[in-house]
Image (spheres, grey):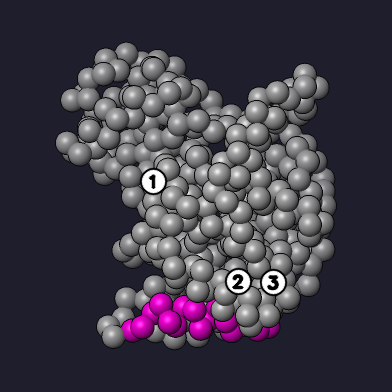
Amino acid sequence: MRSQLARLLLAVLTHLACAGMPAAAEEMPQLPATLNEEVRMLSVGTGWSSVELETTFFVPPGVGPFPLVVINHGRMTGDPRFDPRARYLVASREFLQRGYLVAVPMRPGFSKSGGSYVAPRCNIERNAEPLAETIIAFLREMRRRPDVDPDRILLVGESEGGMAAMAAAATGFPGLRGVLNFAGGLRPNVAACLWQEALVEAFAVFGASSRIPSLWFYGDNDSYWGHDLPRNMFHAYRDAGGQAELISYGNFAAGDAHTMFASPQGVAIWWPESERFLRQIGLPTELRFGPGSTPRPVRTGYADLTDSDALPYVDDRRRELYRRFLTLPLPRAFAIATTGNVGWAQGGTDPLAAALDNCERAARRSCALYVVDDEVVWEAAQRQGSVAADSVREP
């Protein structure tokens, strides 16, 4: 483990290096604004166990075969049927720029995927089994694609998806090189369940049979795990024989550490460490494409920038959030949904896309941009759209 000071220094140096890119780097091919996004219903499994998964693909330009990244989502509160399609635009762009094909499948019972979501019980190891089976069935289908390199696969998971990725890695799937675990875990809502102990025991079981290297990210101000539980899970996994490194990065300054992976501000924490890890397991890290960007809407003059009372749909608490947003430096973007949910982003490679994505995860429907930098771009009659959230996924 590394000190927080060293980690912050590494992040600063990384940003300075990016800011000082030679002119040749600016001439590299740019990713399209759409990031070559495709949405398909992918059938996985056979016979009675077959299920269609709503899957988002981000495909690099070219013919491949490309290394594959599969990002496994967390769980929001409420009925998972109403969860929005997960996209992880910030992270997907990081991998896509480096020539990875990115796949983000929705698990059974989530969003438009078939099958049913089974509420977790206290036996977390048992809960993880069908999640891992779904991931393995998905990987089998992906290995059949001619544009996928079957020997260069990376699993990524956030929250419940992080635990599922660790459980899948324990099967030793061919071609799987490593796992990035972001705040992985599961907290069943079951009376009298000692879920912390059950979670530690489950990770010990995963570690006993896994030989796949993994890199774990947990912050101290994680609203679900706190400070001690991730360390207990990590030591149980390592003591059982699992290969893992824990990046304990302290408090996430931009908010709840449970949301770090999806946040534009999180990239400076997780990418430098992940880059080092990817090199160790023989996966590419070199930039092949420029980041691309979301098209910028034109200024509409709907309202004065500082007039928080003009924001449609929102309540007083979100008006106060908007006033705080206006104190952030550029670049930045703020989005609104008809539900009154809002999302914003500041900095990063594409704050417009990040804001829309965050808002959609909060609202569970599309959002629209209200402000970009210092310009109000809201159209009163527009169909409502996307961006940077005021609520988050739970494990």
Instruction: Report if the CB atoms under discs 1 and 2 are less than 8 Å apart.
Output: no
Give me the C-alpha separation between circle 3 and circle 2: 11 Å
Residue marked by disc 2: 166
Identity of the residue drawn at 60% across and 34% down: 12
| Residue 325 on image: x %, y % | 33, 29
The residue under label 3 is: 243
Q: CA distance from mark 1 to mark 2?
A: 25 Å
The number of numbered badges drawn on the structure is: 3
Taking the image as shown, residue 296 lies to the left or right of residue 13, namely left
* Mark 2 crowd level (few <14, some 14–19, many ≥20, 10 Å Cα): many
Work out whether mark 1 precedes mark 2 in sequence or the reverse, and give the earlier one.
Answer: 2
The front one of 25 and 221 is 221
What residue lies at 45% left-to-right and 70% top-to-bottom? Answer: 229
Residue matched to label 1: 255
Q: Amino acid at mark 3?
A: Gln
| Residue drawn at the location 36% of the way across and 59% of the way down | 223
- Indicate the quadrant containing the C terminus: top left, top right, bottom left or bottom right: bottom left
Q: Label 3 neighbourhood size at 10 Å, few (<14), some (14-19), many (20+)?
A: some
Measuring from the top left, give residue 352's x and y in whole percent: 48, 31
Element marked by disc 2: helix
Q: Is residue 286 magenta?
A: no
Q: What is the magenta range? A: 193-209
Disc 2 residue type (three-letter):
Met
Label 1 or label 2, whichever lies nearer to me, is: 1
Left or right, 380 with respect to 28, comes to left
Q: Is residue 121 left or right of residue 24?
A: left
